[in-house]
């Protein structure tokens, strides 16, 4: 028998061992990188919202950990900081013109326009991490691009305290409503007195989102719902698009949320002293974010979780709504693409809407009986809601027409 050549098998074994080592190293490195993406909410055990710098640092880590995530800078804000936009694009394309040319559906999520209402900040981190790591989202993300403004009112986020939201059930500290000029940025979308707003205008027109979500926390009346929302007001969208939103998109979102034990209801104002006296819809004029985006044919939702519910439940409800919206947009991606205007041409906006008491809808609503009792502080009568006496009714709601 001749001499055998053993060099080739040895080389193959070495190569195999090397690639196995490299594969394991990359897997471990990726796992370590992703393990560093635990959110501040998770780290602090439920009653904590991220600070400005913690949020910036977390998104920088996400940018480094995932090829599908990129953080872009717009701005500057009134504080001189760049407004950041985190983009999750499954095919690693972060050019808005290219993504529109590929007929992707784009969802824009905005957080902390009112930094005392912060659960969207932390819910969006949890959402982004799940979208980037959970294979069950793969089919959806082939068609849907997620854009997140981590913290919009940067100056308000930096002005952190614990006492500007009376009676709110957590978190332990949070930002302030006004920005660096003490402006309410959710009244500035038409005046553009803030550099934050000017940065948003550039960002919005670059990305031209199909759907926009503005995350807030409610105040005022007490009721059973943790999750309420504002949908586009009548007449703010093209008729066929408005009909689709009202009859298909919003009900599908609501069905998903109900399946997760968060029965959502429209965000309402009381016609009298309490919800039991009657309900009116919220008039989202163009000075508000979702009223502004409707001018350009974007479907807008404002999420209003209830301030008297615990922070962790509000955050979970907020997260569920965003998941529902992403899934529903994917399911209806073709119809949304067909119904939205092909170019950004502003819609006609009626500025003198009035509350027409002859026109109303009937909705299910879950409240609490209300009454009066003497204040322990002043001795004067004060309004209170009795949570031992819940009620469920089909309630009339008046809308601005």
Image: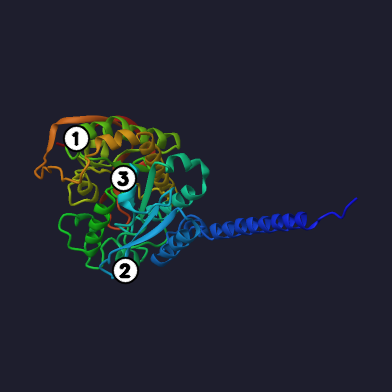
| Mark 1 surroundings: few (<14), some (14-19) or many (≥20) residues within 10 A | many
- Element class at badge 3: helix
- Element class at badge 2: loop
Give the distance between the C-alpha atoms of the residues marked 2 and 3, in whole angstroms. 31 Å
The residue nearer to you, when weighing 327 against 334, is 334
Badge number at residue 219 = none
Q: Which residue sits at x=44%, y=63%?
A: 60
Question: Which mark is first along the chain, 3 or 1?
Answer: 3
Give the distance between the C-alpha atoms of the residues marked 1 and 3, in whole angstroms. 41 Å
For this orientation, the residue located farthest to the right is 1
The residue nearer to you, when weighing 277 against 158, is 158
Q: Quadrant of residue 361?
A: top left
Q: Position of residue 246 (x, y in %)?
A: 27, 33
Q: State whether residue 198 appears in this view.
A: yes
Badge number at residue 101 = 3
Question: Which mark is first along the chain, 3 or 2?
Answer: 2
Badge number at residue 81 = 2
Q: Is residue 307 above or below residue 334?
A: below
Which numbered disc, 1 or 2, marks the residue closer to the eye?
Answer: 2
Badge number at residue 398 = 1
Q: Are marks 1 and 3 in contact (CB under 8 Å)?
A: no
Q: Is residue 25 above or below residue 313?
A: below
Q: Which residue sits at x=62%, y=58%?
A: 28
């Amino acid at each position: 028998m001749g001499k055998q050549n053993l060099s080739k098998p040895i080389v193959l074994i070495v190569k195999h061992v090397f690639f196995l080592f490299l594969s394991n190293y990359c897997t471990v490195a990726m796992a370590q990188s992703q393990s560093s993406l635990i959110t501040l909410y998770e780290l602090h055990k439920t009653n904590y919202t991220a600070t400005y710098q913690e949020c910036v640092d977390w998104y920088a880590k996400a940018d480094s950990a995932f090829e599908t995530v990129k953080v872009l800078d717009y701005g500057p804000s009134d504080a001189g900081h760049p407004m950041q936009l985190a983009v999750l694009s499954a095919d690693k394309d972060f050019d808005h013109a290219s993504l529109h040319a590929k007929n992707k559906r784009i969802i824009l999520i905005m957080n902390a326009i009112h930094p005392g209402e912060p659960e969207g900040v932390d819910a969006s981190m949890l959402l982004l991490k799940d979208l980037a790591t959970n294979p069950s989202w793969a089919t959806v993300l082939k068609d849907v691009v997620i854009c997140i403004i981590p913290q919009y009112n940067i100056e308000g986020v930096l002005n952190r305290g614990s006492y500007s939201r009376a009676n709110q059930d957590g978190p332990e500290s949070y930002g302030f409503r006004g920005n660096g000029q003490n402006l309410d940025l959710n009244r500035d979308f038409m005046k553009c007195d803030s550099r934050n707003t000017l940065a948003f205008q550039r960002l919005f027109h670059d990305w031209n989102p199909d759907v926009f979500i503005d995350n807030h926390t409610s105040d005022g009346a007490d009721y059973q719902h943790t999750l309420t929302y504002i949908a586009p007001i009548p007449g703010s969208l093209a008729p066929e698009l408005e009909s689709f939103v009202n009859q298909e998109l919003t009900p599908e979102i609501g069905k998903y949320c109900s399946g997760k034990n968060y029965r959502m209801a429209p965000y309402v104002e009381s016609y009298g002293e309490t919800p039991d006296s009657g309900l009116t819809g919220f008039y989202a004029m163009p000075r508000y974010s979702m009223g502004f985006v409707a001018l350009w044919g974007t479907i807008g939702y404002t999420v209003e979780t209830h301030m008297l519910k615990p922070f962790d439940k509000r955050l979970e409800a907020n997260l569920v709504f965003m998941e529902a919206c992403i899934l529903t947009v994917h399911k209806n991606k073709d119809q949304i693409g067909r119904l939205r205007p092909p170019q950004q041409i502003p819609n006609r906006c009626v500025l003198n809407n009035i509350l027409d008491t002859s026109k109303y809808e009937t909705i299910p609503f879950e409240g609490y009986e209300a009454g009066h009792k003497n204040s322990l502080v002043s001795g004067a009568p004060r309004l209170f809601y009795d949570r031992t006496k819940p009620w469920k009714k089909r309630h009339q709601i008046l809308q601005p027409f």
